[in-house]
Amino acid sequence: MTRKEYRTATKLVRGGVKRSANQETAEALYMTSGFVYSSAEEAAAAFRDEADVFVYSRFGNPTIKMFEERLALLEGAEACRATGSGMAAVFGAMACQLEAGDRVVASRALFGACHAILTKILPRWGIVTELIDGTDMAAWETALAKSAKLVFLESPSNPVLDLVDIKAVATLAHKLGALVMVDNVFASPLYQQPLALGADIVIYSTTKHIDGQGRLLGGAVLGKRDFVEDVFLPFYRQTGAAISAFNAWVMLKSLETLPLRVAAQTETAGKIAGWLFQHLKIKKISYPGHSSHPQHELAKQQMSGFGSLLAFEVDGGEAAAFTVLNNLQLIDISNNLGDSKSLACHPYTTTHSNMSPEDRASLGISGGHIRLSVGLEDADDLIEDLGQALAALGTR
Ligand SMILES: *Cc1c(COP(=O)(O)O)cnc(C)c1O
């Protein structure tokens, strides 16, 4: 009998469930580091990978497996492994496949720690990365005219919400035999499916929308079985990137409400973007769903929703941005994102302060730039909060 292919919301409630002999309704939380064997022979077979049993929670765990299976169903991926943080996913998915002499091509607009792995850590092992303007297809063509092992990109990017044409980049990369890895945190798995667009590997910080309530760290690597199970898994098992079963269990249950939460946040983000756009103190907004976004057409092609993150630039540079942040009464100042609480940050002096002024300028991260992660509060309360904080700039 073939299994019925359910729709997304159903997969997120039912996918991956494996009940124990107790027939519990909710997924069980297996807080155990180890597992016992019925015989010495079974233990020996387990270590030869010949027995279908759990061995040690650094290798795999029943709760973690349910989380991985549910995520793989959502993404439409053959395989998934969950990690202790988003950065463990990014680093592991790179380090498991790269070696000295390899060349990586990446879009310059990246999460700060991803930028640091590519520019500070991997070069110590002789792996060089060329960073380019990911919005510029001509730059991709030039960079991918010579051999590369891996392409890494984020779209929409943090913190400026630039897009990369994933399908076009994947076509170029595959001519060289390079794998394409996409950090899909900003879009969330609901609104963009990089694998369907031609990418080979998708990574998440599940800390963000997937937990969605600002509690836990986690990450995931998804892709074809021959990458995730044959290349990534051996590295993951030996280097200790595993997620805690508790964190996996909370996030497994969070997946049940992901579509409801992200849809509500996205609707509010769209309202806020429209409201900010007409505000006199705002120089520019960046929201892929707004017609003023230079890549709005691409956003409509490769995303099915525009997400809960937006950025805007206030008139008056850093001093004005600090005034706005310091006058917020409801929205918190925090560098986290994807939370049920709306959070605002000043990337220039926080998440991206390690970058040179030239790098920040080339990415469009200016003193007046504020990133907003829209939460689950009432849209009108958020708009009123932004309104009163912007009013503190006066009427010059
Ligand atoms: C948060 C984040 C990461 C890192 O994830 P952690 O869970 O904090 O390790 C990577 N990429 C993007 C786009 C992120 O937002």
Image (cartoon, grey):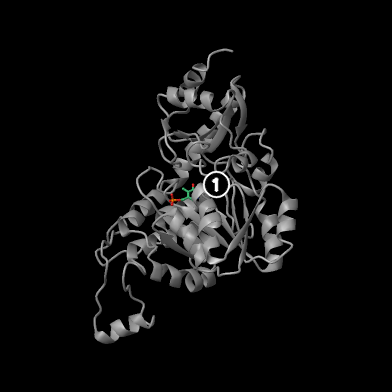
Quick one: quadrant of the C terminus?
top right
Numbered disc 1: secondary structure = loop
- Please identify the quarter of the rendering in which residue 104 is found: bottom right
State how many labels appear. 1
Residue occupying the point 57% across, 26% down: 317
The disc labelled 1 sits on which kind of residue? Ala
Residue occupying the point 27% across, 66% down: 33
Kindly tell me whether mark 1's CB lies below 8 Å from ligand 1: no
Around disc 1, counting alpha carbons within 10 Å, would you say few (fewer than 14), some (14 to 19), or many (20 or more)?
A: many
What percent of the width, then of the height, locates residue 150? 61, 63
What percent of the width, then of the height, locates residue 307? 54, 41
Q: Is residue 135 left or right of residue 309?
A: right
What percent of the width, then of the height, locates residue 37? 25, 79
Nearer to us in this view, 61 or 330: 330
Q: Is residue 396 above or below residue 272?
A: above
Farthest residue, direction bottom: 41
Q: Is residue 124 above or below residue 391?
A: below
Residue 17 visible, this orientation: no
Nearer to us in this view, 112 or 217: 112
- Please identify the quarter of the rendering in which residue 148 is found: bottom right
What percent of the width, then of the height, locates residue 99? 55, 70
Q: Is residue 188 above or below residue 125?
A: above
Nearer to us in this view, 42 or 138: 138
Q: Is residue 369 above or below residue 217?
A: above
Q: Label 1 belongs to which residue?
A: 187
Nearer to us in this view, 49 or 334: 334
Residue occupying the point 61% across, 47% down: 303
